[in-house]
Image (cartoon, rainbow, N blue to C red):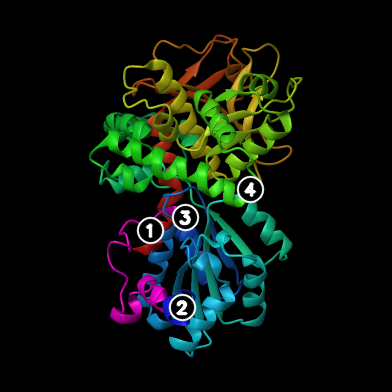
Amino acid sequence: MSYFSEESILNLLYSYNPWWKNGIVQKDFDKPMKRIAFYESWNAFSNEEIRRTVLLSGARRTGKTTIMYQTIAKLIEMGISPKDIVFISFDHPLLKLCSIEDVLGIYKSNITTSQTLYCFFDEIQYSENWNAWLKVLYDTNPNIKIMATGSASPILADKTRESGLGRWTTILVPTLSFYEYCKLLNIEVGELPAGIKPTQIYLLEKTKQNEILNKLSSLQPHFIRYLQVGGFPELALSKDDIYAQRILREDIVDKALKRDLPALYPVRNISDIEKVFLYLCYNSSNIINMNTICKELQVTRNTLEKYVLYLEGANLIYISHLVNVGTKQVLKSQDKIYIADAALRNAVLMKDDITNDPLELGIIAETAVYKHVKAFNYKDVTKVGYYRAGDKDKEIDIVVQYAQNTKPIMIEVKYRDNSPITERDLIVELSQDDKLNMVITKTIDDFGLHEYKNGKKIFKIPAPVFLYLLGYVEAKGYEDSEE
């Protein structure tokens, strides 16, 4: 039997699609907890009026494949024939050498005669000319539904643009939010007031604010662990945090840097991109100077700029650009870098215990806040960056600019003890009565409205409370619709 024979490919397809035989998706694949990204992808995938191919983009082990299995299970529950549903992983060595056309041809010749098909393609970027074939499938078969995953956002974006607009919906699958982490670990806090928004909590009555704070005050120790092990679902469930960090290094970081990126981008020197990522891990949440990095790492400016973009494309880092809020003269633009999940930084730098290191806690807390705000706003036409004006101390960590002529949301992260905000801080100076700026604090009792002698006000809110509420608000509408 030939290695590339139809029989070998068919056997592989049967191993990927056990529901063809038993009619169900096994529980190990169909996880009970559904994330926000599942609901978003299902809404796009099942929409009968606006047909789209759904592309799930995110780093390794964020749960993209789980979302596809959950979707398959839902289709079977709705009465769709299991044999009309096909899952194909193009990460497999054999399937990397086959075209989508060939594999689907074998599937349709041997498994189903239906014209209505539900196709799930894992790690689609490893299939040669995948974008062209998806375009053909979309254009020639109006009864086909397609969901695909990929770990490299720019490649997906570039290829979908090449194939024409209007056929694709890209759903970002970030690591777990703190709310999703708590839900996954069955950490209960009780019912919260409906319609609450963390950026508008200061508008509630004081009694309501205190009620929310009391219910969420128990989250502080869980938040510390969340900062250490991060938002990768499998690792969050692990009982051995040190082992979980090793898995992060070996299975997520190493494979992304040494296998995924060289396969997808023209990476000439793997050790150089490893050095760049290590440097960025050390400097997460900081403004980076490209000339300084080039000098210290001995790489060219062109190479460095490309590698930073590749790392962003692999969903390993976020790039925070300077946002001009139109109030002061903006300094020369430089970018801030955040590691995509705080635990990646801990794993790479081998920091297995950060609880007694205030500086480390501050860095990864700001990293976590930025990730949440960025992920929360990824669908909107927004700018999520930072603001800087005047001297070096005049900076605001996170700024969300929704549109021209609207007042931005400004957030300063002060996750440390005894770090007062004074009237001279930019976050206070730019605060206005109808759009109070926020300071994310460390201790659970550092909460509430703070008014200064000059009449300016800011609102302080502890990090676990703010991040839990941000995820809660986003998820609640989807979860209620399921009940």
SS state under label 3: helix
SS state under label 4: loop
Quadrant of the image for the N terminus? bottom left
User: How many discs mark residues in the rendered view?
Assistant: 4
Q: What is the three-letter code of the residue carrying label 2?
A: Ser
Position of 379 relative to 105 (above/below): above
Which numbered disc, 2 or 1, marks the residue that appears first in the sequence? 2
Numbered mark located on residue 223 in the image: none
Q: Which residues are magenta?
A: 10-37
Q: What is the three-letter code of the residue carrying label 3?
A: Ala
**Circle nearer the viewer, 2 or 3:** 2
Q: Which residue is mark 4?
A: 265
Label 2: few (<14), some (14–19) or many (≥20) C-alpha neighbours in 10 Å: few
Q: Which residue is mark 2?
A: 2
Q: CA distance from mark 1 to mark 4?
A: 42 Å
Residue at x 33% of width, y 29% of height: 224
**Circle nearer the viewer, 2 or 4:** 2
Which numbered disc, 3 or 1, marks the residue that appears first in the sequence? 3
- Residue 214, horizontal then vertical, whole percent: 29, 31
Position of 466 relative to 125 (above/below): above
Q: Which residue is mark 1?
A: 480
- Residue 447, horizontal then vertical, whole percent: 40, 23
Label 3: few (<14), some (14–19) or many (≥20) C-alpha neighbours in 10 Å: some
Quarter of image, res 124? bottom right
Judge by depth and name the residue closer to the eye, 112 or 357: 112
Q: Is residue 401 visible?
A: no
Which numbered disc, 3 or 4, marks the residue that appears first in the sequence? 3
- Residue 321, horizontal then vertical, whole percent: 66, 32
